[in-house]
Amino acid sequence: MANHFERLSLRHSEGSTTILVGRDLLGQAQVPLTPWLEGRTVFAVTCPTVRRLHGSALEPLTAAAARLEVLEVPDGEEAKHLEVAGRLWTSMIEAGGKRDSRLIAFGGGTVGDLGGFVAGCFLRGIEYAQVPTTLLAQVDAAIGGKTAIDWGGTKNSVGLFHHPAMVISDVAFLETLPRDELRSALAEVVKTAVLLDPLLLESVESKLEDLLGGDSKALEPVVVATARAKARVVERDPLEGGDRKLLNFGHTLGHALESALSYRQLRHGDAVSYGMLFALRLAVNRGLEPAVARRCRQILRRFDLPSLPEVDRDRVLGAMARDKKNFEGGLTWILPVALGEGALVDDLNPGEVASELESFLADPWASDE
Amino acid sequence: MANHFERLSLRHSEGSTTILVGRDLLGQAQVPLTPWLEGRTVFAVTCPTVRRLHGSALEPLTAAAARLEVLEVPDGEEAKHLEVAGRLWTSMIEAGGKRDSRLIAFGGGTVGDLGGFVAGCFLRGIEYAQVPTTLLAQVDAAIGGKTAIDWGGTKNSVGLFHHPAMVISDVAFLETLPRDELRSALAEVVKTAVLLDPLLLESVESKLEDLLGGDSKALEPVVVATARAKARVVERDPLEGGDRKLLNFGHTLGHALESALSYRQLRHGDAVSYGMLFALRLAVNRGLEPAVARRCRQILRRFDLPSLPEVDRDRVLGAMARDKKNFEGGLTWILPVALGEGALVDDLNPGEVASELESFLADPWASDE
């Protein structure tokens, strides 16, 4: 008997993305997949680790497509390089790729970012699907059409918006993830829950141990709810002109910490967790109810984050100033104003931010509790 | 007194493109330009020849922008390379480019294709303007949001749709163009006129000598009409799913000739002229009134095209089969069915095409006249 799966959709200017969340999905998702693949040349972009762990999941695709070409890229952030993209385009041209060929990004966020970019620029854009194998990609990176590579020493500096035709999130893949990676991904879930979905925050609170342990039964509804909240906000603001920026809660400081630490000592999600902790301080200064901040902090405390490495305040401030999200006008902060409601704040006094940051870096958990 | 200029607009999914056509426009176009540039970092992508001939036209921009960085790329097709794009992105990052920075592609079709691609992928897309300096770019390449570089030995194999915010076509630039280039560009005008605007065909017929001689007074209304016809068809079909393919009249064989001759012995527009001549034969076989074909041929005859270099028929057929416009399904031909009306034809018998091509390559001008 086929397992249950959840079907969401995200409408955008080029059409719509079908999002499926469930277990052992690739075999089951024949209804959307078969007609999309039938008679096509299909390029599956993946990395060695994912291929080793889950490569057999690609088999149902082979049956449906006219031809499946697997294109392997390095594990991790190394894949997000212009040379790797160039190599994929060369392979796709040599394999006779056409405008109606398909691409499947099968892996975590880096494979998805690279695969979407490669699909978006091949012959001015071919359709692609995201088959995310990590929690971070299932709840965040695979949804919303952001694609990118890293260039010029800057993360995600080259890319485009190109929505996948489908996102197929199989929660069974999550069972092989290490706890560190699950925790880091759960930061994006908390981020989404705090500003967009208080009910989701309750589920996270009540099931946190199972979620951190990679229990796919507990993770499934959390993936569905986070994907749904993200899809709704992306529909309202596809190009991140306004509301979509709410998804950057915790990221203003988070990105700066990652950059100041040369992307080595802190996982992305952990940096975002620290970024949320800091944003909560700023938010309380602007009138957020202290009980709300306390509740969010309590969840993050249960994450048992690695301690914040020592980092120079001015380096962090410098990294914030260079952040690509900045416009000529200055820095925008995303701050909760109540549970389930956030605001874009661009009038914070830089001196206040600098002094608050000083004390935060000295003791991130200090608070009014 | 300011000269008259024509203002068109092209609506698309991301907003709309303002198209201005006139003489000495950059100084005059302050109404759309100044608010678009004010307070911004502006990157002007250009090539040595254009900078030498027309560089001073950039001066009014310097006054409006916060900062103008000129980025020079090689003349001609060499600019459309991934390494050149990478170098521009590096410069833009180092210069502190932001999401609200602007890019201006100042040059011919290659600068426009590259500049649009670089703008479209920088920080997932910044706004840009096309300031085309060639007739080909003013009537065709700068309008419609197609951007690309060449990769893997294939023209325009990597790129995206990214519409410019503005196209500013100054016909004064056309006065410095050599006759060969004007003739080649007029092929795209004829292409547009035959399928979309019979009145434009009449103007071309009556003014052909002035147009070929680079008379900007004669060229101005032709640029306006061709730009308008292209804008209307792009509005109807932005992603080239249907009607926009009409703009490929003459290009199925034209591209194949260019490719079979290694892009060396025939200009793009001249290849398109030969492509139209051939398509007219196929069209007459399918019922196009011979008088219409004759009229089109007469214009092309007045172009005084360089003779068609000797080229192997099977090489040409092979190049058509590899053409990026092909889908897994096969080859599409754009054929006129009457003056001002074209059709996409995908059911031509390959044997018939091959045999017609044989006699065409032996004597392209032979006909039922």
Image: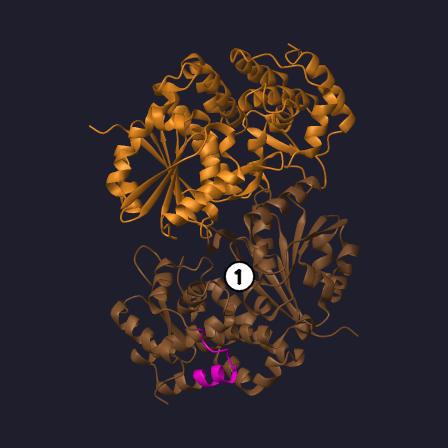
Chain colours: A orange, B brown
Q: Position of residue B4 (x, y in %)?
A: 71, 75
Magenta region includes residue B307: yes
Q: Residue at x 30, y 57 (%)?
A: B329
In reply to whether residue A172 is colored magenta, the answer given is no
Residue drawn at point x = 54 percent, y = 58 percent: B145
Is residue A95 or residue B67 the one in the foreground? Answer: A95
For the N terminus of chain A, the image quarter is: top left
Above or below B85: residue B55: below
Residue position marked by numbered label 1 in the rendering: B144
Viewed as shown, does residue A90 lie left or right of B60?
Answer: left
Q: In the rendered image, is residue B288 in sight?
A: yes
On what subunit does the disc labeled 1 rest?
B
Quadrant of residue A150 within the rendered picture:
top right
For this view, does B31 lie left or right of residue A19? right
- Position above or below: B168 against A92: below
Q: Residue furthest bottom?
A: B369
Residue A33, given in percent of the width and then of the height, sits at 30, 41
User: Viewer-proximal residue, A305 or A298?
Assistant: A305
Q: Quadrant of the C terminus of chain A?
A: top right
Residue range highlighted in magenta: B296-309
In the image, taking residue A100 as reference, residue A316 lies left or right, namely right
Query: What kind of residue is marked 1?
Result: Gly
